[in-house]
Amino acid sequence: MGIVTRGFGGRRPDPGRPLPPGQFLTQDFPVLSAGPTPDVEVDRWELVVTTEHGHVRRWSWGELMATPAEDVVTDIHCVTRWSKHDTRWRGVSVDVLLGDVETTGEFVLVHSYGGYTTNLPLADLLDGQAWIAFEYEGEPLEPVHGGPARLLVPHLYFWKSAKWVRGFEIHDVDEPGFWETYGYHGYGDPWLEQRYA
Amino acid sequence: MSASSQWHVATVVDAPRITRTARAVTLSVPGFSGALAGQHVDLRLTAADGYQAVRSYSLTAVGADERVDVLVDRVPGGEVSTYLVDDLRVGDQMEVRGPLGGYFVWRPDDAGAVLLVAGGSGLAPLLAMLRARRKIGSTAPFRLVYSVRTPDDVFFPDELDGGASDVEVALVFTRTTPARWPRPAARLGKDDLVAPGFDAADGPTVFVCGSTGFVETVAGLVTELGHDPARVRTERFGGA
């Protein structure tokens, strides 16, 4: 295009290692939500997985806490252009949760307390790529960041990492979630800069 | 590729300073059209050596094609906002993509009541809604609650002065008030969010925009006041 913005360019930060295109590094943990933060009590919390055949598997908070968890250190990338290096989480791998769920469905619609939804291929939740995270930087996950538990899928833009997660619906067909119906990309790979549909 | 995902060349046509820390930037952008109040654009700046930075800014006015109005408040140390506030000149060029976003939006055919709650530069997308309402002659009931630190921090005070308008504007000062101001300086509270025609029972759509802390506080307060969380739409301004 050849456009140069006169006088711009003197203060660039050094990210240390490559960032996805169009992202900048932040030390903060900004928040993006479409509405109020829901109040989710762990006593009533549950995670519900529903397959394409209507089979249901549930986990209570106590059951989630009794499931082997992992420490995860990962970079995260928000579609609003901030990225954060080396964030530290603790959570249960989705591989463990879906291990005995029988399905041939290929797509998941993730549901959250408060009504948020987001969609992604089931394959992106498996093979060590996704967790139900309940700690951030060694502390219980704060409600504003999705606590008591959020989905963590760090290889996709962070709107896919649904806060206040309460369930997965497995489908044979891909159904758009909340932001996806408002013009955001169906898949959301930050390295391919899949921001908008 | 849709028109809103293409980059358009933009030229600065006006950039007055409106407070100690903020400027209202107007860009001429051939090919840009169709924005709704509440939507945002991406601005892309390119240095002489090819380095680029992109940031999102809410539109402060809509309805004029090929024109983009944004408000830029300086974030200390912010790579893009400090440039735009301190160095930008009329005639400078950058690129614009948009309009973007379809949820935090007021549509002109919506006749329902609207409660707008702004913290600081969070006024930007709400200002676009107020201006769109006025421009089309909508009679939808609107109320703006606008929280700022001091009288010097009010953006567009003449325009927001309720005298000539049927929109009630409630200014909330958190540090310093004007002389003889009836409300003492204090953080925004529930009392500031209550007004006939805009209470939970009236079912207004509530738009809240500001910093994360502001939005969390206000969204919590309106939910406690009984507003349906599904009618509360939030937008936050991150740093940089």
Image: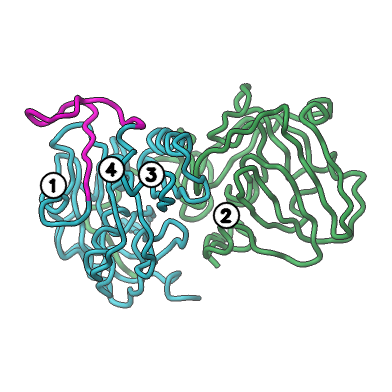
Chain colours: A green, B cyan
Amino acid found under the numbered disc labelled 2: Pro
Amino acid type, label 1: Pro
For this view, does A66 lie left or right of residue A160? right
Task: Identify the element where label 1 is drawn.
Answer: helix
Query: Which labelled disc corresponds to residue B145?
Result: 4
Q: Which residue is mark 1?
A: B157
Quarter holding the C terminus of chain A is: bottom right
Q: Chain of mark 1?
A: B
- Callouts 4 and 3 in the same chain: yes
Instruction: For marks 4 and 2, give the CA distance.
Output: 37 Å
In the foreground, A61 or B180: B180
Question: What is the CA distance from the residue labelled 4 to the residue labelled 3?
Answer: 13 Å
Q: Are marks 1 and 3 on the same chain?
A: yes
Residue in the picture at 76% in, 37% down: A46
Marks 1/3: CA distance? 25 Å
Q: Is residue B158 above or below residue B76?
A: below
Label 1–label 3 contact, CB within 8 A: no
Q: Which mark is residue A87?
A: none
Tell whether label 4 touches label 1 (CB within 8 Å): no
Assess disc 3: are there few (<14), some (14-19) or many (≥20) residues with their C-alpha within 10 Å of its C-alpha.
some
Q: Overall secondary structure of the magenta stretch? A: loop
Circle 3 sits on which residue?
B199
Which residue is under mark 2?
A190
